[in-house]
C-alpha cells in the first residue's frame, strides 16, 4: 500500500465556540461544557474554511494516542476500503484532503492520569467494578455463543474455564480487590481463546480490564477538573472542538467513541449527514445503553443517517440490538445495523472496520454529497 508520509498534516490550536452548543430540542441531562480547553487537533488535508465536508474520527478504548499517526492510519484504511468499494477515483481526494477535512478527535489523555504508574493498568473503584462485572460477563457470554455456533470445542473449553472463574467459591479473601482479581483472571483466561491469544493487544486480563473500565469511567460522570468539568464533558468537548455547524459533517466513531459521539451530537447545532459507529458497546443494555443520556435513548436530532457496523468476532460488541432499544429521532431517523466479516482474528480496531468496502463506501458517498 502506498505510503502516506507525504500527506500534509497540520497541527494547530482551536477553540470551541460555546454558543454553537445546547441549541437543540429538549436536551439530555449531560452537557457539553461552556468552557472548552484549547488543545491541538490533528487534521489531514489542510485547514481551509470552505464548504468542504468535515470528517471527524472518534477513537475508543486504549492507551494514549499519537493523534497525527492515528489520523493518517484511519484515512489510509478508509482509502483502502473506498478503493475496494469501487470509489478508486476518490482515493486521492481522501488522502490529500480534497474530498474532506479529516480530524482525529483525541481524548485519550483524559484517561491516562488514572493509570497506575508503569503498568498501563488501573485500580478500579467500587463504581468501576459495578460496571465491569456485568460488562465482562456479557463479553464471556458472547464469546460462548460464538464458539457454540462455530462448534469450536477448544474455545468452548477455555470459555467454560472463564465462566467458572466468575463464580468464586468463597475461599478468597473478600474486599474491593477480590472482584477485580476475579474479573482479571477471567479475562486472562479469555485471552487464551485461539485467535485472541495470537492477536490481542493486551498482555493479560488485568490490562484489558483497565481499558474496559474507561467505558464505566466515562459513564460515571465524575473525575472533574479544577473548573468542575467532569471527564465525560471534557471528552465530548474534544469531539465537537472546532467543528463548523455551517459545513457538511460525517462522524466515524469507534468503540467507546460511539458512546461519546452519540451524547455529543445531541448538543450539536448543525447537521450530521452520516454517523457511522464501529464495534459499538451501545447495544450492551444494562451496562451501557441504560446509562447514556438522554433516557430513553434516541437518535440525535442532528443525525440524518446512522449506520452501525459490527463484526461477529469482535469480543467488545454484543449482538446488534441498537435498532430495538434505540428510539428514532423526532424526524424518524433510526440506527441501521450491518454486519461485516473482517479478516484476521483481532477485529476490534477501527482500521479493520474501515478497510471493509461495506463500511467505507457509504462514508465516501456521504462526503461527496
Image (cartoon, rainbow, N blue to C red):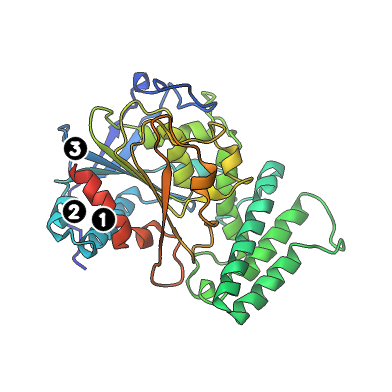
102 and 300: which one is in front?
Answer: 300
Q: Is residue 91 left or right of residue 308?
A: left
Label 1 belongs to which residue?
Answer: 361
Q: Earlier in the sequence, mark 3 or mark 1?
A: 3
Q: Circle 3 sits in a helix, a strand or a loop, which is it?
A: loop
Residue 77: where, in percent of width, then height? Answer: 29, 60
Q: Earlier in the sequence, mark 2 or mark 1?
A: 2
- Which of pointers 2 and 1 indicates the residue nearer the eye? 1
Q: Residue at x 17, y 32 (%)?
A: 49
- Which of pointers 2 and 3 indicates the residue nearer the eye? 2
Is the Cβ of the residue at disc 3 closer than 8 Å to that at disc 1? no
Residue 34: where, in percent of width, then height? Answer: 43, 21
Label 2 belongs to which residue?
Answer: 95
Q: Residue at x 48, y 46 (%)?
A: 323
Whole-Å distance between the Cαs marked 2 and 1? Answer: 15 Å
Label 3 belongs to which residue?
Answer: 47
Q: Is residue 264 above or below residue 313?
A: above
Say which quadrant the C terminus sits in: top left
242 and 13: which one is in front?
Answer: 242
Q: Residue furthest right?
A: 171
Q: Is residue 205 above or below residue 369?
A: below
Q: Residue at x 40, y 29 (%)?
A: 37
The image quadrant that residue 261 belongs to is: top left
Residue 12, visible in the rendered structure: yes
Whole-Å distance between the Cαs marked 3 and 1? Answer: 25 Å
Q: Circle 1 sits in a helix, a strand or a loop, which is it?
A: helix
> Which class describes the residues within 10 Å of circle 2: few (<14), some (14-19), or many (20+)?
many
Q: Which mark is residue 58?
A: none
> Which class describes the residues within 10 Å of circle 1: few (<14), some (14-19), or many (20+)?
many
Q: Earlier in the sequence, mark 2 or mark 3?
A: 3
Amino acid at each position: 500500500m502506498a505510503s502516506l508520509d507525504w500527506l500534509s498534516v497540520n497541527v494547530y490550536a482551536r477553540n470551541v465556540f460555546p454558543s454553537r452548543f445546547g441549541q437543540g430540542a429538549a436536551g439530555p441531562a449531560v452537557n457539553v461544557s461552556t468552557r472548552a480547553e484549547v488543545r491541538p487537533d490533528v487534521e489531514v488535508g489542510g485547514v481551509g474554511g470552505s464548504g468542504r465536508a468535515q470528517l471527524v474520527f472518534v477513537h475508543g478504548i486504549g492507551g494514549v494516542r499519537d493523534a497525527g499517526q492515528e489520523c493518517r492510519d484511519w484515512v489510509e484504511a478508509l482509502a483502502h476500503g473506498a478503493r475496494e468499494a469501487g470509489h478508486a477515483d476518490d482515493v486521492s481526494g481522501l488522502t490529500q484532503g480534497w474530498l474532506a477535512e479529516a480530524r482525529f478527535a483525541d481524548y485519550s489523555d483524559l484517561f491516562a492520569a488514572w493509570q497506575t504508574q508503569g503498568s498501563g493498568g488501573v485500580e478500579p473503584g467500587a463504581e468501576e467494578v459495578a460496571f465491569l462485572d456485568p460488562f465482562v460477563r456479557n463479553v464471556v457470554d458472547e464469546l460462548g455463543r460464538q464458539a457454540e455456533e462455530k462448534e469450536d470445542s477448544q474455545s468452548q473449553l477455555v470459555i467454560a474455564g472463564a465462566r467458572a472463574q466468575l463464580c468464586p467459591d468463597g475461599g478468597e479473601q473478600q474486599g474491593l480487590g477480590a472482584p477485580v482479581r476475579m474479573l482479571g483472571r477471567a479475562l486472562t483466561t479469555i485471552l487464551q481463546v485461539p485467535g485472541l491469544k495470537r492477536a490481542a493487544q493486551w498482555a493479560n486480563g488485568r490490562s484489558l480490564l483497565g481499558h474496559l473500565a474507561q467505558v464505566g469511567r466515562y459513564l460515571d460522570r465524575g473525575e472533574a477538573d479544577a473548573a468542575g468539568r467532569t471527564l465525560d464533558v471534557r471528552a465530548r468537548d474534544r469531539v465537537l472542538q472546532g467543528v463548523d455547524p455551517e459545513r457538511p459533517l460525517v462522524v466515524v466513531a469507534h468503540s467507546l467513541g460511539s458512546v461519546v459521539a452519540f451524547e455529543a451530537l445531541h448538543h450539536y447545532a448543525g447537521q450530521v449527514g452520516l454517523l457511522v459507529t464501529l464495534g459499538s458497546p451501545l447495544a450492551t443494555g444494562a451496562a451501557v445503553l441504560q446509562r447514556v443520556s438522554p433516557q430513553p435513548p434516541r437518535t440525535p436530532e442532528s443525525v440524518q443517517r446512522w449506520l452501525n457496523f459490527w463484526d461477529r468476532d469482535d469480543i467488545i460488541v454484543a449482538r446488534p440490538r441498537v435498532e430495538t432499544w434505540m428510539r428514532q429521532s423526532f424526524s424518524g431517523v433510526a440506527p441501521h445495523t450491518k454486519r461485516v466479516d473482517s479478516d484476521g482474528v483481532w477485529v476490534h480496531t477501527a482500521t479493520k472496520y474501515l478497510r471493509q468496502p461495506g463500511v467505507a463506501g457509504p462514508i465516501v458517498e456521504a462526503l461527496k454529497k
